[in-house]
């Protein structure tokens, strides 16, 4: 079911207000009206699992991979940079690109959506578990504990040989084409790489197992700002749906998961989440 708060607060509408620019801005300005069906589910849920993607951080100004391809890297395909093959071919080049992303993400601040989730997690009788595909630390900086960073973290660097953790290297404020990676202080052979999951690399086992678990034992699952394309993360909300657990999607645009969601709320993270958390206490 598609919930369009601009046309029917009971959540019975099936129209998609983002099909044209005019109705998109209409949706944004009124999205703080939380659909009743969603309020009811959120109020009664005790174990809430929140799956977040790049859209969660969009309102913080964190660019997607594609948007980050400016300046030095305009003509470079990120799929050619975020791979083990690229790292072994040209470590300083890949290192410099990831350090530019460290700089961009350090300069960003958590948005109202991150803060709302942190506040929801602090409520009594609430077990709110965050599983994110994001490699930024904006949930943590808003005060949440993240159960699983499915794709690793830009702030957890490690040796490419012995895998022991290392401090995040200094990230220059200006884009730099090549930066030699730090050497590992432990094994003397390895070099320090970003702790993110690259294309063709497996997801961290503990994180994925925990994510599966909390999609199966939740009262409610929220999917926020993910296109549902990157596997296996995209399979997670289906685990909940298959068990009859309600799944709410919050995303301004249709996604691969939209047809399977119990409710779709066409809004942004920074608009919808504060309104939803405020509505939990509404008489
Ligand atoms: N912040 C980050 O850490 C970051 C940024 C870019 C990419 N990535 C990585 O790239 C991959 C991209 O997959 P993905 O599905 O997470 O992202 P995606 O770019 O494929 O999809 C983003 C989704 O967010 C939605 N969106 C845009 N603005 C939004 C907003 N303000 N509020 C809510 N939703 C909004 C879009 O409609 C889209 O459906 C992931 O593997 C991720 O690890 C991470
Ligand atoms: Zn090492």
Image (cartoon, rainbow, N blue to C red):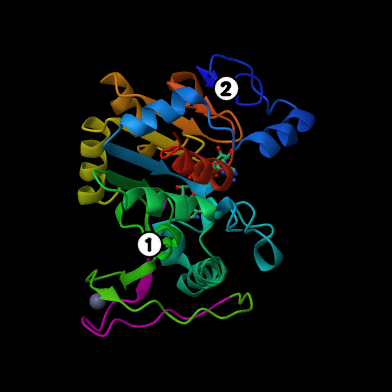
In this rendering, the answer to whether 28 lies above or below 244 is below
Magenta segment's dominant SS is loop
Q: Is residue 182 magenta?
A: yes
- Image quarter for residue 32? top right
Measured as percent of width and height from the top left, residue 42 is found at 38, 33
Question: What residue is at 30 percent from the left and 24 percent from the top?
Answer: 245
The magenta stretch is 178-199
In this rendering, the answer to whether 102 lies above or below 261 is below
Question: In this orientation, does residue 104 appear?
Answer: yes
Give the secondary structure at mark 1.
Answer: loop
Q: Is residue 104 left or right of residue 120?
A: right
Residue bearing the label numbered 1: 143
Q: Residue furthest front?
A: 283
Nearer the observer, 218 or 120: 120
Residue bearing the label numbered 2: 9
Q: Tell me: is circle 2 under 8 Å from ligand 1.
A: no
Question: What residue is at 56 percent from the left and 81 percent from the top?
Answer: 172
Measured as percent of width and height from the top left, residue 10 is found at 53, 18
């Amino acid at each position: 079911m598609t919930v369009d708060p601009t046309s029917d607060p009971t959540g019975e509408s099936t129209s998609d207000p983002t099909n044209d620019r005019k109705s998109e801005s209409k949706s944004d300005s009124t999205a703080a009206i939380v659909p009743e069906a969603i309020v009811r589910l959120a109020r009664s849920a005790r174990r809430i699992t929140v799956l977040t993607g790049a859209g969660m951080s969009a309102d913080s100004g964190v660019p997607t991979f594609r948007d980050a391809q400016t300046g030095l890297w305009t003509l470079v395909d990120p799929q050619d940079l975020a791979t083990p093959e690229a790292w072994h071919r040209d470590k300083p080049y890949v290192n410099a690109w990831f350090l530019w992303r460290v700089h961009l993400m350090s300069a960003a601040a958590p948005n109202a959506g991150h803060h709302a989730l942190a506040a929801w997690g602090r409520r009594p009788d609430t077990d709110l578990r965050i599983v994110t595909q994001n490699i930024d630390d904006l949930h943590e900086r808003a005060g949440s504990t993240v159960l699983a960073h499915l794709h690793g973290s830009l702030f957890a660097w490690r040796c490419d040989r012995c895998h022991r953790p290392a401090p995040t290297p200094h990230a220059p404020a200006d884009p730099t084409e090549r930066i030699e990676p730090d050497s590992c202080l432990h094994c003397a052979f390895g070099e320090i790489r970003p702790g993110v999951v690259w294309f063709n690399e497996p997801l961290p086992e503990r994180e994925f197992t925990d994510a599966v678990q909390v999609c199966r034992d939740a009262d409610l699952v929220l999917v926020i700002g993910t296109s549902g394309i990157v596997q296996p993360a995209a399979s997670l909300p289906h685990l909940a749906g298959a068990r009859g657990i309600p799944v709410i999607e919050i995303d301004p645009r249709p996604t691969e998961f939209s047809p399977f969601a119990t409710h779709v709320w066409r809004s942004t993270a920074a608009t919808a989440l504060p309104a939803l958390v405020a509505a939990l206490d509404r008489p």
